[in-house]
Amino acid sequence: MTRDKRASVPARIGLTLLGVVQIAFALAAFSDLWARPDKQVRGAKPAWIPVILVNWIGPAAYFLIGVKKR
């Protein structure tokens, strides 16, 4: 017998939700980068754009390292 190679419905729903959350995380990072004054961001703002595009790691790095603490 051969198995159907398509993902199950719960797996597809889970992956879709994971993708939506990842995109929302990146959009939140881009929104914060755009709104935050230059003095509150470590390094140049344009340098953070490609970093944020790296799935999960980029937005997390921006919020953990790129934003100066008050």
Image: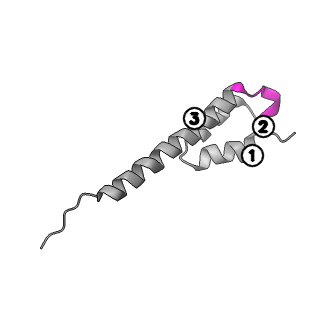
Q: CA distance from mark 3 to mark 1?
A: 17 Å
Location of the C terminus by quadrant is top right
Numbered disc 3: secondary structure? helix
Q: Residue at x 47, y 50 (%)?
A: 18
Quadrant of the rendered structure where residue 8 is?
bottom left
Q: Which residue has dot 2 on it?
A: 42
The image quadrant that residue 69 belongs to is: top right
Give, as a single range, the part of the protein colored magenta. Answer: 35-42
* Image coordinates for residue 44, horizontal then vertical, percent: 73, 31
Q: Which residue is mark 1?
A: 65
Name the residue at the left extreme.
1
> Label 2: few (<14), some or many (≥20) within 10 Å?
some
Labelled pair 3, 1 in contact (Cβ < 8 Å): no
Q: Are dots 2 and 1 in contact, CB under 8 Å?
A: yes
70 with respect to 67 (left or right): right
Looking at the picture, does residue 47 appear above or below residue 21? Answer: above
Q: Position of residue 55 (x, y in %)?
A: 53, 47
